[in-house]
Amino acid sequence: MQANDMRVLKSAALLTLAVGLPAIVVAMLAVGVKGAIGAGIGLALVAVFFTIGLVLVSWAGRISPAVMMMAAVSGYLVKALLIMAFLKAFENTTAFHPRAFAWTVIVCTVVWTIGEMRGFVKLKMLYVEPGRDAIPGRGGSDVA
């Protein structure tokens, strides 16, 4: 993982943690220990899923921009489907409070995404390398 990717991961993770920990406390106060357990599992689920996703996109970015784009789009699709599957699978559980789990997952997912966007904006990376043409043989640097 490159240093830039670590900065984005750190930005997203810290922001999510700053929202997830109070969510655990709120769930504990609202519905008790089962609420705190549900919220804690939700926070952990989002952190693990989105960290793995960012690592995979970072790895794919070293291969090519096209592979990185495929990894990013398919990664978000897979994460969304898996999170929905978890929410559906645990909607009637008695081990923890399913609503605290669901709301924490939803809030932490939104916050993680905002943290990633914030991290990428702060990087101020160039998306196009200056002086390089997309199609070799065309453009300003080649003289015929």
Image: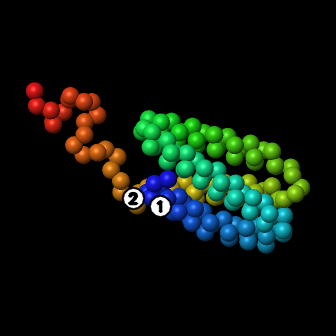
138 shown above or below 42:
above
Type of residue at label 2? Leu
- Asked if residue 18 lies left or right of residue 2, the reply is right
- Asked if residue 43 lies left or right of residue 135, the reply is right
Residue sitting nearer the eye, 100 or 48: 48
Q: Earlier in the sequence, mark 1 or mark 2?
A: 1
Q: Quadrant of the C terminus?
A: top left
- Asked if residue 42 lies left or right of residue 133, the reply is right
Tag shown at residue 7: 1
Q: Residue at x 25, y 30 (%)?
A: 136
Residue 31 visible in rendering: yes
Q: Secondary structure at mark 2?
A: helix
Q: Position of residue 41 (x, y in %)?
A: 75, 58
Q: Residue at x 36, y 57 (%)?
A: 124
Q: Position of residue 70 (x, y in %)?
A: 51, 36
143 shown above or below 29:
above
Q: Residue furthest left?
A: 144
Residue for badge 2: 123
Q: Sort mark 2 into few (<14), some (14-19) or many (20+) by Cα contacts within 10 Å.
A: few
23 shown above or below 132:
below
Q: Residue at x 55, y 45 (%)?
A: 56
Determine contact: label 1, label 2, CB under 8 Å: yes
Type of residue at label 1? Arg
Q: Sort mark 1 into few (<14), some (14-19) or many (20+) by Cα contacts within 10 Å.
A: some
70 shown above or below 87:
above
Residue 115 visible in rendering: no
